Amino acid sequence: MTPDPQVQDSDRDDRLASLLAHRTLAGAPREELEWVAQHSSRRRYQVGEVATRKGEPERWLQILLAGHLAAVVNRGAGSRRLIGWRGGDVCGLLPYSRGGSPPGDTVAEEPTEMLLVHQDRFPEMIRECPRVTALLVHAMLDRARFFTSSDSHDEKLVSLGKLAAGLAHELNNPASAAARSARRLVQTLAEAEKAERRLEGVPMSEAQRFALDTVRHQCEPLAGGVARSPIERADREEALAAWLDEHRLDPDIAPPLVDSGARLESLDALAQSFSGEALDAALRSIAAGCAARTLAAEIEVSASRIHELVAAIKGFTYMDRALTLEPTDLKRGIVETVTVLGGKARAKSVAIDLDLAPDLPRVPAFGGELNQVWANLLDNALDAVGERGRIEVTARRERDQVVVEIVDDGPGIPADIRSRIFDPFFTTKPVGSGTGLGLDIVHRLVLRHEGDVEVDSRPGRTTFRVSLPLRQSSARSNSG
């Protein structure tokens, strides 16, 4: 409900008394408070009533006399209370603020009473009430500091949530693969023990033992370090099945031998040394050994992938480093960021091409903060491109700075909103899908590093260009 600026002034003296006792404004001269009392209107809110709504422009200075207001926001993880104001506080639109709309609804949590001054009165108030204006500006600065800290904290939590979800998905694949291989390995070892017991009953000459050991030594998975193509694998499987059929052996022996390096000529030599039940026992022992080696190799690959992911997230977050300004390897940070977001890229079949200059110099920076810049820009690019899209990341030196460009082939940013994309809470994503803080955080962090971020966009090519100086100003370097 919008207050009426033409309300009668019969309670002006009561309003003045309230202002003289107001925690924020009581220090102003009486004549200035009289002006506020004369040009304000009184408004009362019941519990649950909305004082200002998200998306609607703020037009009123709110001087709380009693009660309690709370700003409630939803940044993709459900509604929560962001900040509250009680009697003695000021909120709403303040002089010299940029205006805009609040990030969420402002709701009365108790019966609340306030005085309201419309923004049309601000020029006169600034002229007639300099001390009141100064007090309101101080309140605005305190509020800006709070929101800046809160926004940064919220965006970090949102980013952390996305990264945690992505990392959980990335870790789940190799972890599941390792668990499956471990279960199969237990079964395979039991089969190997059974085969060995059968083979122990076969008397063997030195020539037979040599033929058996020759095949066993060839039984390394993916021999030569090169995986077979599906066609090559099918051809080999067919050849092994034919060999087993020719020697009247169980075709189930073939699968463990397919991906091994066991050669047919070695199997021929083995068949010349063994026959009948002895050949079957020898081949089952070899097949079980091949299967065990293959499963062990799969477990090793899975464990290595988990180690790589943990190392990437550790480097990405700088979790073992103090937050200090230091020479920072941008290439490493970008690669670790791509690794962390790799699951999201693969889910959309998006190709991420890296072109990072080999002689890229280090820049003085807070490494974790720059990784947050790359993460936000890459995450936005992944959201922008379609299935099988493409993202290019380049980094090079230009004179006394390093320039990083992130280019995507998405639909582009419409010209009418391009100037607003770095504004806090501005987002084109559906409700619950974005906070509208990512690019604002990017802008702030790049400015914190005395750099610059620019955007150029057209359909099929959107470029975010981040420029970072190779040297910080002396004042910044001294302050750290």
Image: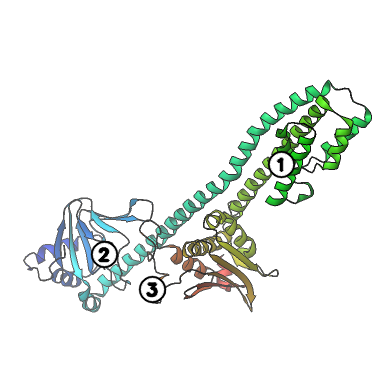
Q: Amino acid at mark 3?
A: Ile
* Residue denoted by label 1: 297
* Residue denoted by label 3: 417
Residue drawn at x 78%, y 30% as measured from the top left:
285
Q: For the residues marked 1 and 2, what is the alpha-carbon distance in whole angstroms? A: 63 Å
Q: Is residue 190 found left or right of 139 in the rendered image?
A: right
In the picture, the disc for residue 423 is none
Of the two numbered discs 3 and 1 on the same chain, state the one appearing first in sequence. Answer: 1
Q: For the residues marked 2 and 3, what is the alpha-carbon distance in whole angstroms? A: 25 Å
* Residue denoted by label 2: 92
Q: In the structure shown, which secondary structural element does the residue marked by tag 2 occupy? A: strand
- Nearest the viewer among 270 and 261 is 270
Q: In this rendering, is residue 190 above or below 452?
A: above
- For label 1, the crowd category at 10 Å Cα-Cα, with few meaning under 14, some 14 to 19 and many 20 or more, is some
Quarter holding residue 183: top right
Residue 248 rendering spot, x and y as whole percentages: 77, 31
Tell me whether the residue at label 2 lies in contact with that at label 3, contact meaning CB atoms closer than 8 angstroms: no
Residue drawn at x 65%, y 35% as measured from the top left:
182
